Each structure stands twice: as C-alpha cells, then as structure tokens.
Image (tube, rainbow, N blue to C red):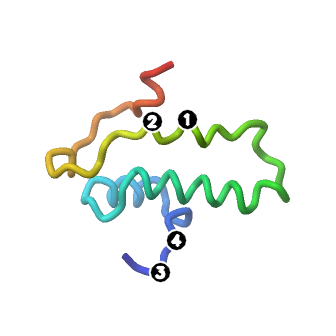
C-alpha cells in the first residue's frame, strides 16, 4: 500500500481495497477508531463512541472465499 493513511481513503477506494484484499475491515475499523481517539477530544463531535461493539460487527475478511465478495448491507445494520 502507498503512504496513504486508511482514514484518508474515500469510501469508494476503501471498498475497492476491501474487495481486493489489500486491507481488512478490522484494519479499517481500528484506524477509524484511532483517528477518533486522536482528534475527537479537540472536536467534540461524537456523543458516544462504542469501540467495544465494533469488532463483533465486522464481517470476516480473512478467508480466501470472502475475498472480493460484497454483501450489500453491513452487518451492523442487520443487527438492529
């Protein structure tokens, strides 16, 4: 991967990288949570960050059979 940080990716680029296996949903989520922790104290833009609930909602993206697949709606949306 280039020097682009994950939080700098557009949603389209992140989706492409997830599908081609060059990043994982876990890495993308952890990067987003780290970014929130780093800058939100100054911005105060989140009421609640539920980092502990993020990992169980991730789709597995490590098996070869999941590489390149898309499912439409996110698992977090389906659990509500």
- Binning the other alpha carbons within 10 Å of mark 3 as few (below 14), some (14 to 19) or many (20 upward) gives few
Q: Nearer the viewer, mark 4 or mark 2?
A: 2
Residue drawn where x is 21% and y is 51% of the image? 67
Q: Are marks 3 and 4 in contact (CB under 8 Å)?
A: yes
User: Toward which corner of the image does residue 46 lie, by quadrant?
Assistant: top right
Helix, strand or loop under label 1: helix
| Residue corresponding to mark 4 | 5
Question: What number is the disc on residue 53?
Answer: 1
Q: Are marks 4 and 1 in contact (CB under 8 Å)?
A: no
Residue highlighted by disc 2 = 56
Q: What's the mark number on residue 3? A: 3
Q: Nearer the viewer, mark 3 or mark 1?
A: 1
Q: Is residue 60 above or below residue 73?
A: below
Contact flag, marks 2 and 1 (Cβ < 8 Å): yes
Choose the circle earlier in sequence order: 4 or 1.
4
Q: Are marks 4 and 2 in contact (CB under 8 Å)?
A: no
Tell me where residue 66 appears, x and y as whole percent: 21, 45
């Amino acid at each position: 991967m280039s020097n682009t940080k994950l939080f700098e990716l557009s949603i389209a680029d992140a989706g492409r990288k997830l599908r081609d296996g060059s990043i994982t949903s876990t890495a993308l989520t952890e990067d987003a949570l780290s970014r929130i922790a780093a800058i939100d104290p100054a911005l105060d833009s989140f009421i609640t960050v539920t980092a502990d609930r993020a990992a169980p909602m991730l789709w597995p993206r490590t098996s070869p059979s999941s590489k390149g697949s898309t499912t439409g709606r996110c698992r977090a949306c389906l659990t509500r």
